[in-house]
Image: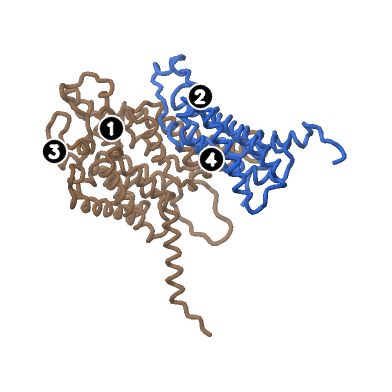
Chain colours: A blue, B brown
Amino acid sequence: MSEREPLFSPKNLKLLREPLSTSNPITVQVLGICSALAVTVKLEPSVVMAISVMAVLAVANVVVSFLRNYIPPRIRIIVQLTVIAALVILVDQILKAFAYDVSKQLSVFVGLIITNCILMGRLEAFALGNRPWPSFLDGIGNAAGYGIILIIVAFFRELLGSGTVWGYPVFEKIGLYNVGYENNGLMILPPMALITVGIIIWVQRSKNKELIETN
Amino acid sequence: MSGLRKFIDRIKPQFEKGGRFEKLHSSFDAFETFLFVPDKVTTKGAHIRDSIDMKRTMAIVVLAMVPALLFGMWNVGYQHFLAIGEDKLFWEVFAFGFLKVFPIIVVSYVTGLGIEFIFAQIRGHDVNEGFLVTGMLIPLIVPVDVPLWMVALATVFAVIIGKEVFGGTGMNILNPALTARAFLFFAYPSEMSGNLVWISGLNKGEGILDGFSGETILGQAAAGNSTFLNGLHNPYSTWDMFLGKIPGSIGETSTLAILIGAFILLYTGIGSWKIITSVFAGGLVMGLILNLFAVNTLMEIPAWEHLIIGGFAFGAVFMATDPVTATQTEKGKFIYGFLIGFLAILIRVLNPAYPEGVMLAILLMNVFSPLIDHYVVEANIKKRLKRARVSS
C-alpha cells in the first residue's frame, strides 16, 4: 500500500450510494423481504428497525472485516453468526431499556435481524474481502437502502391504513372522515406491504431500464 | 352512418404513424372498431376466419349478465321498500333500484376504461375489450350501499394490480372483478359485510320498521338460526331463494336470472359447460359431506340449497368461466371447477367469518389453474409415451 486512499474517494462513495438505488437490497436484490412485511404497519417501528439494522450491519461488517484474515474459511458462517447474534442481543437490550414500547411492537423481529439475509449477504460478499473502512461504508449504505424502502412502505401503510403519520392523525385533522373517507383495512394486512414493495420496484424499473431483467 | 364513416376516414391519417395525434392511435382505433367492423385481415400464415372477435365475445357476456342486472335493480328496490314498510308499484320499485345501481355501473366503467385507455397510450398497445365485462361484473358483486369512491378505488386497484402489471388483458392471473371485490372486502369490511349493508338505506337507519333485520341467509345460518327469516320475520321459501327475493350483493341473489345468463353463455359457446357443471357438482359433494356431520346450522343447510344462496351460482356462471383465469385444458376444467365448488362451500361453512367463500375459492383456484394445466399436460405426455413403441 504505497498511497493512502482518501476516506471518501469516489470508489468509497459508490459503496454508500449504490445500495440506495441500483443495487438496493430490497427492490433489486430482493433480500430482507420478511421483515419489510412485518414491521412496516407503522412508521415508528420501521424507523427503529432501520436504525437497528444499520447499527448491527455496520458494526458487524467492521468486526468481520478486522477478523477476515484470521477466520478459517470452513467455520466462517458460524463466526459471522456469532458476531451478528452478539450485536443483535445488544441492540435488543438497548431497545428494551430505552424504547420499551417500540421494542414490544417489534417483538421477535429485532431478534430475527440475525436471519435477515442482507446481513449474511454483506458479510459474505463484502466484509470478508475488504478493509474495515469500506466495509463500514458498505454496511451503512446497504442498511440505508433497506431502511429507506422500509420507511417509504411504512409511510404509505400507516397513512392509508390508519390515517396517521408517526401517530399524528393527519386525515382526522384535515377532516377527511367527515366527507365519508374510511381507512383502508387492507393496508394493515401483510399482503399490501408486498404489493407496495412491488409498486416501488415497478416505479424504479420503469425509471431505470438497466434493472429490467431479460429472460 | 356513411357520414360518420367519412368523418372517421378523414381524420384517420392524423392518428397513424407520423400523424399529429400519433400518441392517441390506440384510443382512435378502439373507437373505430367499436363503431365499425374492422377492415383489417390476417395476412400471414394459416388462419381460420370467424365473425366472433373479442368485442363480440365480450358483448355476449355483458348481454348474459343483463337478466341478473335487471333483477338486481328490482330487488334493491324491493328489499328497500320491504325494510321501510311501504307498498310501491313495480315501476317505482324498479326505478328506485335503477337509481341506486346505475351510478355504480357508471363509476366502474369510467374509472376502469379510463385506466385502460391511459395504459394503452403509454404502452402503445390497443385498448382491450376485457374491461367491458369486468366493468359490468364489479357492480353486480358489491352491496348496493357501497360508497362510489370505494368502487372507483377498487376498480383502479383491480385494473392496475390485478391486470396491467401482468401485461394487460389476457395476461392476468386473477379475475379482475373478483380482485376488486376482494380488495373491498378486506379494505373496508364494515361496508362489505354484516347485517346492514345488503339492503339500501339500512346503514343510515332511515325509517326502518321496528325489529327489521337485514341479515343475509348465510349470516343467519352462521348465527345459528335454523329457519331463515326475512326482515319481517317471515320464513324465506326455497322459491324466494331461487328467484332471488333475498338480501345480497346486487346481481348475485337471483339464481333464475343467473341461469338465463348461463343459458346464453352456453348456447353461444362462450362459457364452458364443463366448468359450470363441475362447480355445481363440487359444491353439491362438499355440501353432502358436511351434511353427514351436521353439527351446526351451517352444516345442516341442505347441499342443494347451498347452490342457490349467496354468490355461488353467480360465481360459477360468470366468474369461474373467465377464459383467461380458468384452466385451458379440457380435463383441467373439470378439476378446476370441481375444486372451486368444493372449496367455496368448505370456506363458507367452516369459516363463518368469510361467508362468501365463493370469491376466495375462485381466486385461489385462479392461482392454481396453471399448475392444474401443467399436470394435465404432463399426464397426457406420459400416457402417450407409454403407448409409444420404439422400433429397433
Label 3: which residue? B227
Residue at the (25%, 32%) spot, across then down: B74
x, y percent for residue A49: 54, 31
Chain name for mark 1: B
Q: Looking at the image, is mark 2 or mark 3 nearer the viewer?
A: 2
Tell me, yes or no, whether the two marked residues, 4 and 1, touch with CB atoms within 8 Å. Answer: no
Label 2 sits on a secondary structure element that is loop
User: Is residue A59 at all visible to an observer of this figure?
Assistant: yes
Q: Are marks 2 and 3 on the same chain?
A: no
Q: Are marks 4 and 2 on the same chain?
A: yes
Left or right, B369 with respect to A194, comes to left
User: Is residue B6 at all visible to an observer of this figure?
Assistant: no
Q: Looking at the image, is mark 1 or mark 2 nearer the viewer?
A: 2
Label 4: which residue? A33
Q: Calculate the distance from the C-alpha at mark 4 to the C-alpha at mark 3.
A: 49 Å
Label 1: which residue? B73
Chain name for mark 2: A
Query: In this picture, is B17 found above or below B287?
Result: above
Q: Few, some or many C-alpha atoms within 10 Å of disc 1 (few <14, some 14-19, many ≥20)? A: many
Does label 3 or label 1 sit earlier along the sequence?
Answer: 1
Q: Calculate the distance from the C-alpha at mark 1 to the C-alpha at mark 2.
A: 56 Å
Q: Calculate the distance from the C-alpha at mark 4 to the C-alpha at mark 1.
A: 46 Å
x, y percent for residue A74: 64, 54
Chain name for mark 4: A
Label 2: which residue? A99
Label 1 sits on a secondary structure element that is helix
The residue sitting at the right extreme is: A2
Left or right, A124 with respect to A42, comes to right
Q: Looking at the image, is mark 4 or mark 3 nearer the viewer?
A: 4
Q: Which one is nearer the viewer's eye here, A11 or B19?
A: A11
What type is the residue that disc 3 sits on?
Thr
